[in-house]
Structure formats: C-alpha cells, structure tokens
Image (tube, rainbow, N blue to C red):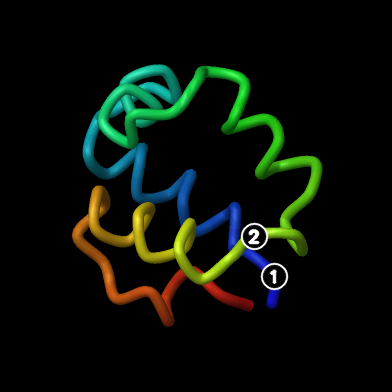
Amino acid sequence: MKLNIKKIDSELKRLGWSRIEFMKRLKAPKSFYYYLVDNPSTVTFTTVNRIAKVLKLNPKDLII
C-alpha cells in the first residue's frame, strides 16, 4: 500500500491548510508529514484512516 501524497497536498490546498495546520489537526508531530513524504509505502491502515478522517475523505482515495 502506498500513500497518495499528491492527493493530500491537493486537499490541503483546497482546504487552505498549511502542513503544520494539518499535523496539528492530525495530532502528530510536524516532522511526521515529511516522514510520510519520504516513506509513503510504509503507512499503516490506521494512519490512512486517521488522515482520511481529518481530511474528510474516503481512505481509498488516499491509497495508490
């Protein structure tokens, strides 16, 4: 499973959120975003579900 970083970035832009704002809403450290970008293939279903919930998306939309 690989996380679709482009989809996340487009959603952040649509919502007008910075990456820092996104991490605050995700209740994750700021560095977590860069971990996701550098390691998109290592995400778990739990992480995908958390991200989808914050962005109000279907988790399937975040997987490539």
Q: Are marks 2 and 1 in contact (CB under 8 Å)?
A: yes
Q: In terms of secondary structure, where does tag 2 sit?
A: loop
Q: Position of residue 3 (x, y in %)?
A: 62, 63
Left or right, 38 with respect to 46, comes to right
| Residue 44 falls in image quadrant | bottom right
Residue at left offset 66%, top offset 44% = 36
Q: In terms of secondary structure, where does tag 1 sit?
A: loop
Q: Position of residue 30 (x, y in %)?
A: 52, 18
Residue 61 got which mark? none
Left or right, 38 with respect to 16, comes to right
How far apart are the two marked residues, 2 and 1, measured between alpha carbons?
7 Å
Q: Answer few, some or many: residues within 10 Å of disc 1's Cα (few below 14, many 20 plus, some between 14 and 19).
A: some
Q: Amino acid at mark 2?
A: Val
| Residue 53 falls in image quadrant | bottom left
Q: Amino acid at mark 1?
A: Lys
Left or right, 27 with respect to 38, comes to left
Left or right, 38 with respect to 14, comes to right
Residue at left offset 80%, top offset 41% = 38
Q: Is residue 39 above or below residue 30?
A: below
Q: Is residue 56 above or below residue 27?
A: below
How many badges with numbers are in the image?
2
Q: Answer few, some or many: residues within 10 Å of disc 2's Cα (few below 14, many 20 plus, some between 14 and 19).
A: some
Counting residues from the start of the chain, the first of labels 2 and 1 encountered is: 1
Residue 2 got which mark? 1
Q: Position of residue 23 (x, y in %)?
A: 40, 27
Residue with the mark numbered 2: 43
Residue at left offset 24%, top offset 48% = 54
